[in-house]
Image (tube, rainbow, N blue to C red):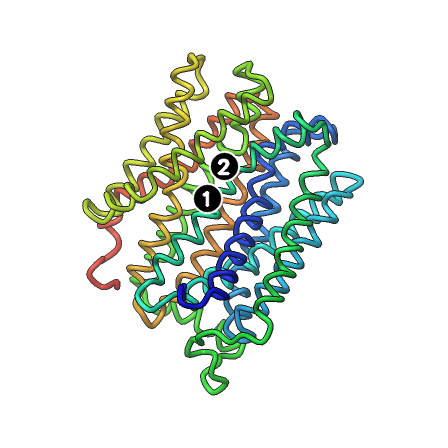
Amino acid sequence: MDTDNPNYIVVFVLNSILFFFSGIAKFIYTPLLSPLKNSLSISSTQAGSLITFVYLGYAFTRFPSGILTDIYGCKKTIIYSSFLTGLSLLLLSFSPNYLVLAILSFLMGGATGLYTTAGYTFSVLIGKTGKETTSTALLELFGGTASFIAPLAVILFLENLGYSWNSLFLAAGIGIIITSFLFAYFMKGKKIKKTIKSDPENQNSFKEELTEIFEVFKHPNLRKFIIWATLVGGFGFFAIKGFESFIPTALAEAKNYSFSNANKLFTIIAVSGLITKMGVAWAADKFGVKRIFATLTALNLIFFIIFTLHINHFMIILTLIVLGITFKSHNTLINSYVMKKSPEKYQGSGFGLFSTLYTIIYSLGPMAIGYFIDKYGLLVGMRFSLIGVLISLPLVISFKYFIDETQLG
């Protein structure tokens, strides 16, 4: 960011806080699944479906967010999408039944998807030249913190303060709306650096943007790469999101921890991931993304099984630490690899298409695993997450046999 201008520091921090609340809006569902099941008298399939609806909404708006950012600018997109997120959270807090909660969860997920691309773009545009990566890393730090804060917020509101689950959505909605007002106030009349598409003569229409996306599939090797990355990233995270969504529930209902201690243990995943993310990225640069990705996916195969066995407290902690490393590095590795290997001409459209498709795949994880839990029981049902691992791991290992890497970026 431009550290010579205090106002830019303020708006950078405010955008990062919006990024934090955007993360909270999505991460809060996992530690709330058990209270939601009890309060609404719903099945594990229905509870898991709430997370699925959030990420489906998120998936469908990721690419349109990029188009809106290009056409209207990231400032307007951030402000309107953040207000929309806050409004949907407020409405969620007053949901009278499961159906309304499900619909609003989808809309809220869509609002966060609209924000995400604009939020990332803004952090880069106001960064000093040569410091864009640092700005992005700082932004992601706020998002990573949200995954740690979410279960602690559940403990605070439900156990310490004695409030219902509705209060969490209400508090998050108020927080993001206040931050949106502050962001709009400090950005009033401000201009930021523009990308090339900000020039009206260079802007693409929505139709032209869609045409550019489908251009990706005219190149056979690139087409195969995008399909490969979508399946690897999508099913790999299908396994992660499906398994992770029921970890707090399993700790409380199958491992006999109290609700409070279960959510405290769940924070180990976030802390482990935050601490090790940069180390995993370094290892991927040094030894190759596919090797590290395959290693982390194999660790999921092993530790998913271990977690669902009868293990002691020490092994549970060790398992959660390892899962933190594998869970929180998955998206970083696959996203960076797709961006790196996509030819510059098709980098934006290729990555946009990949992001939407692979998010649709992994969003189905919580719903699917919830179904298996209802059918076969909690721990046995969670093992079905291995379906995603068993699809993604062979694809990573066999990459060189059907894709010519030399013809990529």
Q: Can residue 349 be seen in this view?
A: no
Lateral position of residue 274 relative to residue 200, left or right: left
Residue shown at 54% from the left, 34% from the top? 245
Residue 196: percent from left, percent from top: 41, 79
Task: Work out which residue is located at the far right of the displayed protein and give it.
Answer: 96
Between residues 69 and 5, which one lies in front from this camera angle?
A: 5
Residue shown at 57% from the left, 60% from the top? 114
- The answer to which quarter of the image holds residue 92 is top right
Q: What residue type is labelled 2?
A: Phe
Between the C-alphas of marks 1 and 2, the distance is 7 Å
Where the N terminus falls, by quadrant? bottom left
Q: Relative to 15, is 296 above or below? A: above
Residue shown at 48% from the left, 31% from the top? 267
Q: Mark 2 points at which residue?
A: 148
Kind of element beneath mark 1: helix
- The answer to which quarter of the image holds residue 373 is top right
Q: Which amino acid does label 1 sit on?
A: Gly
Residue 27: percent from left, percent from top: 55, 41
Where the C terminus falls, by quadrant? bottom left
Q: Do the residues labelled 1 and 2 touch (CB within 8 Å)?
A: yes
Q: Relative to 352, is 162 above or below? A: above
Residue 96: percent from left, percent from top: 80, 40
Residue shown at 73% from the left, 32% from the top? 164
**Residue 144: which disc?**
1
How crowded pointer 1 is (Cα within 10 Å; few <14, some 14-19, many 20+) is rated as many
Between residues 355 and 405, which one lies in front from this camera angle?
A: 355
